[in-house]
Image (tube, rainbow, N blue to C red):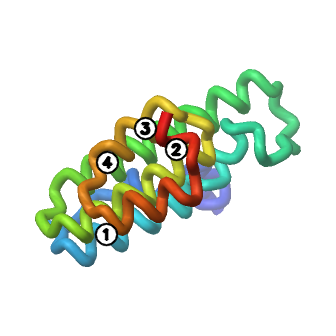
Amino acid sequence: MRWFNNKVQPRDIWEEPVPVPLGDIDAAERIRTICRSATDSAERVGGIAPTGDKRSPPKQRETESARYQRAAKAAMEIAMKVSDELMRDAAVREIVELCLTARDMKTARILFRAIQSPSIRDGLLREHPELAA
């Protein structure tokens, strides 16, 4: 039984090809899914989650950091294609939350400044006052 010996790594959602051009709603949903899927890596990068893996901590941190960065990049690329401003701002908020979880303040602040909607911007600022700096 050869198929048991196949060691195919499970693919992350952001590595799967998008079969058709996404509409704004589908794009926002995909961004939300990407951000939620990468939260565990962001927590490990940010030092929130304990590392219970048998790999060496620097190697694991590198792996988790690369995974987080791939997810954030994929989500940002999708967000740039969303035409509805409010939906794009809501999607960018999800990415900012992911960056904050990973303690990637530089990227979080840059994305925060890209949010145009006052309600989304003010809500995010209330929850995370460190973005104002």
Residue count near mark 2 (Cα–Cα under 10 Å), binned few <14, some 14–19, many ≥20: many
Q: Earlier in the sequence, mark 3 or mark 1?
A: 1
Residue at 26 percent across and 70 percent down: it is 87
Q: Which residue is mark 1?
A: 28
Residue at 46 percent across and 40 percent down: it is 108
Q: Secondary structure at mark 2?
A: helix
Residue 96 located left or right of residue 24: right
Q: Which residue is mark 4?
A: 76
How far apart, in angstroms, are the residues tagged by discs 2 and 3?
Answer: 9 Å
| Amino acid type at image mark 2 | Cys
Residue 82 lies, in percent from the top left, at 18, 62
Judging depth in this view, the residue of 92 and 41 nearest the camera is 92
Q: Does residue 80 sit above or below 106 in this rendering? A: below
| Amino acid type at image mark 3 | Arg
Q: Secondary structure at mark 3?
A: helix
Residue count near mark 1 (Cα–Cα under 10 Å), binned few <14, some 14–19, many ≥20: many
Whether the residues at callouts 2 and 1 have beta carbons within 8 Å, the answer is no
Foreground label between 4 and 3? 3
Whether the residues at callouts 3 and 1 have beta carbons within 8 Å, the answer is no
Q: Earlier in the sequence, mark 2 or mark 3?
A: 2
| Amino acid type at image mark 1 | Ala
Judging depth in this view, the residue of 67 and 79 nearest the camera is 79
Residue 13 visible from this viewpoint: no
Q: Which residue is mark 3?
A: 109
Q: Which residue is mark 2?
A: 99
